[in-house]
Image: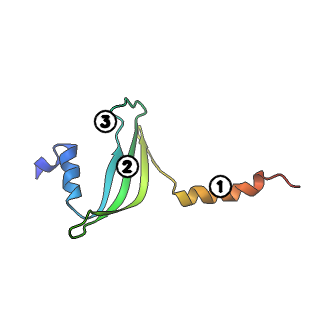
Amino acid sequence: MFYLIQTREAFEGRLRSMQGLEFMVTHDPSNNGHQQDNSGVWVIRKQYRRKRQGLDDEITPISCYFVIGENIYMAPSVGNVLGSRMVHTPASIPPT
């Protein structure tokens, strides 16, 4: 069983073969493909994976987290951002 967690690729491959709630690293600043990323920001997505016979897995994102140094921040949902903008919009409209 130890061989499943020796590398990140092996561990994530094992997670992809299972179903249920999981946390996946979606952005790693040290492994950003072609670009050098010195931001130090990690992005972790909480998601639910459901297996389907003969089809690709159905993945439902639940929330997103940013890890900066030792601090973990939960990203706001689109609904929260839009709701906040709508609440503050009337205050910025000058009276006629």
Q: How many marks?
A: 3
The residue at 34%/36% (across/down) is 32
Residue type of the residue flagged with mark 2: Ile
Residue 12's x, y, as percent? 23, 50
Height in image: 94 above or below 27? below
Callout 1: SS = helix
**Dots 2 and 3: beta carbons under 8 Å?**
no
Spot occupied by residue 81 in the image (x, y as percentages of width and height) = 58, 55
Circle 3 residue = 31
In the rendered structure, which amino acid carries the disc numbered 1? Arg
Q: Is residue 17 left or right of residue 61?
A: left
Q: Give the residue at mark 2.
A: 44
Q: Residues within 10 Å of mark 1 (few under 14, many from 20)?
A: few
Q: Is residue 50 above or below residue 95?
A: below
82 or 3, nearer to the observer: 82
Q: Mark 2 vs mark 3: give the one in front.
A: 3
Residue 8 on image: x %, y %: 22, 44
Q: Which residue is mark 1?
A: 85
Cα distance in 3D space between marks 1 and 2? 25 Å
Question: What secondary structure is found at the residue carrying circle 2?
Answer: strand
Q: Residue at x 33, y 47 (%)?
A: 25
Q: Which mark identifies residue 76?
A: none
Dot placed on the residue nearer the N-terminal end, 1 or 2: 2
Residue 31 coordinates in the image, percent (x, y): 31, 36
Which one is in front in this view, the residue at disc 1 or the one at disc 2? 1
Do residues under tags 3 and 1 come within 8 Å of each other at their CB atoms? no
Residue at screen point 57% across, 58% down: 80
